[in-house]
Amino acid sequence: MGAVTPLGVDAPTTWANLIAGRSGIRRLTTFDSTTFPVRIAGQVPEEFDPASAIAAQADRRWVNRPGLFGLAAVTEAIRDAGLADSAPGSYDPDRRGVAMGASVGRPSVELLLRIARARSDSGRSDAFVTQAPGEVLTGDQNVPLNAMARLLCATGPMVGIHTACAGSGHALGEAFRLVQEGDADLMVAGGYDSLTAWADIVGFGVLGALTDKYNDAPQAGSRPFDAHRSGFVLGEGAGAFVLEDLDSARARGARVHGEILGFSSTLNAWRITDSPPDGAGATEAMEGAIAESGLGTGGIDYVVAHGTGTPGNDLSETRAIKKVFGDDAYRLVVSSPKSMAGHLTAASAALNVVAGLGAMRESLVPPTINLDTPDRALDLDYVPHTARAMPVRAVLVNALAFGGSNTSLVLGKVGS
């Protein structure tokens, strides 16, 4: 696995800060937010250096900010899988592929500003501006995916998924299916995103989704499951994982972090921004993934929650967990990495997988920080403030997206 997140520029550092309960949320530096109602976000640390993380200068030249995070995470994952020097000979190129929950393509902020100026200066509402070919390339959703495939020497499946906050959950699930069904031998899967430009802050702010109460205390801003939660905090980053058949991985001596045991995706289409109050959609996704895993609810120890910190999402997800797990819901532990990293949108499920794999590996569950005031309607064990040492055999990872897309993955500890 590999990761670039507000908690660190690689997977080990991200995990270390997760279990330490350190926040990566800070004052926005991607633009001057002084006059904006929201001035905080989970941002990748400034020490992130694309030149050190990504070898090919051409990739760095044509890939945009979120794509750079994704490429760095993929580079780390390939190296962690022991493929950095042997990728061309490990599997046939047409049996290797890439699946990514990708940042949603949109016109660059700079282009929008140039169009606005052109229309203002000319007095014409239909005035437009031309774009250089390089600008078009850096905005193309497929360019980072192609660069990732090139890193893997892959000519097999290439899947870019744009289901908002469920993107990396879908990508991991689709890659799992491709390997499971024999359509690929090795897939790199995960997600990347960066919605920290001024247009993103304005857009989500207009929707009323972001908290604007913690500009002077950024690290307290993301408050999943807390009674005083008031909206989520945007974040950015990437997570990537190498998936292959377990026997094949063992045969080549790979270090195996965990196993995907089940996957399910659903759609509730309740509202664009809200989850259904009764947890519909999330309920069916969790049930489907658990059913495929064969574990039953009693076999799951930890739920890595979507846990955004909005009043509606946290209540809906809690109700869904109670409906799925019944009495087992009060035995479970549930926590939200978003309390420390903010909402990585298309990469949020990938961060949750890092948390789940780490919990199984080290028998240590990351906390939910900022959970200072319990909400009486939310009465599960959300692991407040401090990481908890406990055996973790299997993990359920949730991603519940704008527009109603939901994914759940069951991860197992190999040998359990």
Image (cartoon, rainbow, N blue to C red):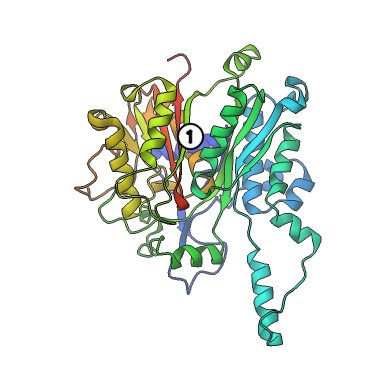
Quickly name the residue at label 1.
353
Q: Is residue 201 left or right of residue 331?
A: right
Q: Is residue 304 left or right of residue 3?
A: left
Q: Is residue 195 above or below residue 344?
A: below
Residue 28 percent coordinates (x, y): 51, 62
Write down the quadrant of residue 87 in the picture. top right
Quadrant in which the C terminus appears = top left
Residue for point 69% across, 25% down: 83
Quadrant in which the N terminus appears = top right
Residue 369 percent coordinates (x, y): 34, 45
Q: Secondary structure at mark 1?
A: helix
Q: Is residue 43 above or below residue 291?
A: below
Q: Nearer the viewer, residue 277 or 193?
A: 277
Residue 359 percent coordinates (x, y): 41, 29
Q: Is residue 231 above or below residue 225?
A: below
Residue 164 percent coordinates (x, y): 52, 50
Q: Dot 1, crowdedness within 10 Å: few (<14), some or many (≥20)?
A: many
Residue for point 37% across, 34% down: 303
Q: What amino acid type should be assigned to the residue bearing mark 1?
A: Val
Residue for point 68% across, 68% down: 111
Residue for point 75% across, 52% down: 62
